[in-house]
Amino acid sequence: MVNRREFLVGGLSLAAGLAIGGAAVASLKPTEEVVTTPQEKEYLKAGWIYVGPVGDKGWTYAHDLGRKYAEERLDFLETIYIESVQEKDADRYIDELVEEGCDVIFTTSYGYMDATIEAGKRYPDRIFMHCSGFKRSENVGTYFIRMYQPYYLNGLIAGAVTKSNKLGYVAAFPIPEVVRHINAFHLGAREMNPDVETYVVWIYSWFDPDAARSAAETLIGQGIDVLAFTEDTSTVVEVAEENGVFSFGHYTDMSMYGPNAHLSGQIANWGVIYEDVLIRAYTGVWYSKDYWWGFAEGAVDIAPMNKYVPSDVKALVEERKALMAEWTFEPFTGPIYDRDGNLQVPDGERASHDHLWNMMYFLPGIVGELPTT
């Protein structure tokens, strides 16, 4: 099994000392020495460790927008971050953030999980939050977002606009998170158009514009006219724009990269989680728990739908979005069968947290291999 977000890319650093919303923010490259000056503070200092560069347009960029969101809204907050950190090096950069005086540290990749747990043991007076993991302790919490919810909504759009009945998906790694995305997208598409098939190509990378381009072009060559993806760049949207087909963005609004191609997209609003965690930490009421927030908490959204989305489909999408925000509708409600005919979710039941978290099967109509190792 490949660890989530396990890759190294060249870093793009913002200028150190950039002021945002009256709070100081600094960027540290992994090779920089950290020098601390002990001082008495009446504010909260938080640090982030990013697996990619803040300019990746996807995963890390969305997390950094969340950091800025919290910083702009919380007068007591000072932030710092380190970008492009390999997962095997997480422990020493966590130490650097502690030396920098961080009271709360966010580690934003699955592969940082064990290092975060160990850091919690070394620094019992600090708070740690790990993204996408499942291990917690007294001073280590976890958090993630229900990105499958907006994927389902975008699937409704895809099923409505396709002319070829062929959708394409450029997928990073065969892990439950990505499988959940694919299934949710396909589930929405089949609701609108039972004849739709979704073709999956794996690129085995979170950040690889060349591989994403090659996969998207291959899918278009097979007659696919709508694309979706889980990869950290805007490449698939750009390829769709170049070839006159449709696509959806991922993590952030990518409409600028494909004004005609970009139908909508999945939006990650990490900031609402960061704000909640940091207020709790500052006021002394934080406790270790697992956040898995979605539309109900404002942690996910969809990008604005473009002119090619029919008005009745837009109305349906907004209706379902509102129902999910009220928890009166969930996409993975049974009966749900996998493509081998096995009943996965019984009639009338909603898929449980653990079921969704461990999803490793494809729905009927999804074309492509699903590696299990």
Image (tube, rainbow, N blue to C red):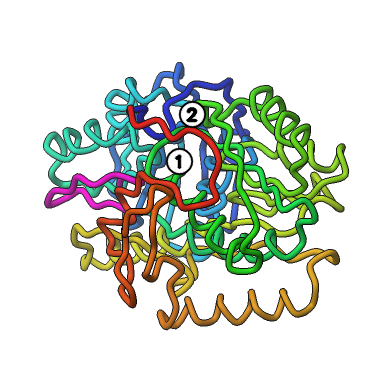
**Closer to the camera, 166 or 118?**
166
Q: Residues within 10 Å of mark 1 (few under 14, many from 20)?
A: many
Of the residues shown, which amino acid type is indicated by label 1?
A: Ile
Check if residue 134 falls in the magenta segment: yes
Of the residues shown, which amino acid type is indicated by label 2?
A: Leu
Check if residue 133 falls in the magenta segment: yes
Q: Quadrant of residue 315?
A: bottom right
**Closer to the camera, 202 or 22?**
202
Residue 261, image x and y in percent?
Answer: 81, 50
Label 2 sits on a secondary structure element that is strand
Tally of marks: 2
Labels 1 and 2: the sequence-earlier one: 2
Q: Quadrant of residue 58?
A: top right
Magenta residues (range): 130-143
Disc number placed over residue 340 in the picture, else none: none
Q: Quadrant of residue 14?
A: top right
- Residue, x 84% and y 43% (percent of image)? 241
Residue 101, image x and y in percent?
Answer: 31, 40
Q: Residues within 10 Å of mark 2 (few under 14, many from 20)?
A: many
Residue 111, image x and y in percent?
Answer: 33, 31
Residue under label 1:
80
Residue under label 2:
28
- Residue, x 28% and y 56% (percent of image)? 355
Label 1 sits on a secondary structure element that is strand
- The correct choice, above or below, for 363 with respect to 349 in the image is above
Farthest front residue in view:
341
Residue 280 visible, this angle: yes
The quarter of the image holding the N terminus is top left
